[in-house]
Image (cartoon, grey):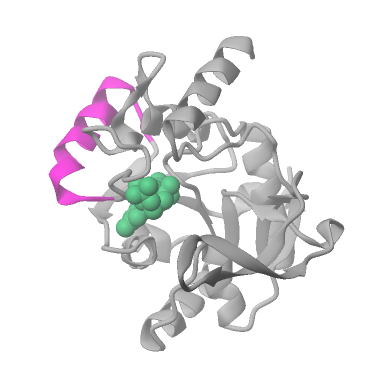
Amino acid sequence: MSQQSTLRTTLIVPAAGSGTRFGAALPKQFVSLLDVPIIVRTLQVFEQTPSIDTVVIAASPDFHDHITELKQTFRLEKIAAVVEGGKERQHSILNALQTPVCAASDIVLVHDAVRPMITPAFVTRIVEAASLHGSAIPGLVPKETIKECDILPNSPDNAAVVKTHERSRLRAIQTPQGFRREILLEAYQKAHEQCFVGTDDASVVEFAGFPVVVVPGMEENIKITTPLDFRWAEWLLQVK
Ligand code: CTP
Ligand code: MG
């Protein structure tokens, strides 16, 4: 039996966004993708992942009853708590981290509600890497050349190149991101006290001074951000 089976692992799913760039009437995580809501597709993968014990969802109180209905309809048995989502994603995570179920965990994973294309094997690789290194996140070498730019003051759609980064040293970062619970909690508390706002969970952990290891990401693990991403996800589900 692996060491993993003795570690308690909780997944936090931030689902309190409003989906501005997606532009639907409903927040995108509740929109159906081939007849099943995106958030349900995401949670179904974790239901099938033995290395995940429990799930905490952060969502707007307007949707808590809806999540309870989805839990019953789709038998999402690992959902242990639904907490209030914050104005920023970071507030949503801090609320979830303070639940008793998180407090009793060794490893905490955080995964966007709108990334349904992950697999149980991929999730387990993150759990294992997090328990080994303390913090582990999936990333891909970008396909495009990435340039650092300054926005032109009189022409905000355009920008002046400052630097071209060496592509092999860059990683486009995904979720799930995995951490030993005490590292993630200490990092979020420090960020809260010092008003640091990061763009992902690892940036909060980096801010707090902990090392973070990047493991190979999964090309299909797209974040459904725009209507075109939704079409990609439909296609990926149909061809798989
Ligand atoms: N999220 C959250 N709380 C927030 C903002 C975002 O829990 N205050 C969640 C979203 O619900 C999503 C994930 O974080 O699962 C990734 O965020 P993103 O793709 O940016 O979703 P939205 O913020 O909803 O979209 P947009 O930025 O286009 O408004
Ligand atoms: Mg957002």
Q: Residue furthest front?
A: 154
Q: Residue at x 53, y 70 (%)?
A: 152
Q: Name the one closer to the observer, 81 or 203.
A: 203
Residue 73 sits inside the magenta stretch: yes
- Residue 193, above or below 39: below
- For the stretch drawn in magenta, the main secondary structure is helix
Q: Residue furthest bottom?
A: 194
Residue 86 sits inside the magenta stretch: no
Q: Residue at x 61, y 52 (%)?
A: 6
Query: In which quadrant of the rendered image does the C terminus lie?
Result: top right
Q: Name the one closer to the observer, 66 or 160.
A: 160
Q: Quadrant of residue 69?
A: top left
Q: Which region shows up in magenta?
A: 59-77
Q: Is residue 14 visible?
A: no
Q: Name the one closer to the observer, 7 or 226.
A: 226
Please indicate whether residue 129 sits to the left or right of residue 61 in the image. right
Q: Quadrant of residue 33?
A: top left
Q: Residue at x 59, y 19 (%)?
A: 236
- Residue 145 point in image, percent of width and height: 77, 52
Q: Residue furthest top?
A: 238
- Residue 202 point in image, percent of width and height: 58, 66
Query: In which quadrant of the rendered image does the N terminus lie?
Result: top right
- Residue 179 point in image, percent of width and height: 59, 63
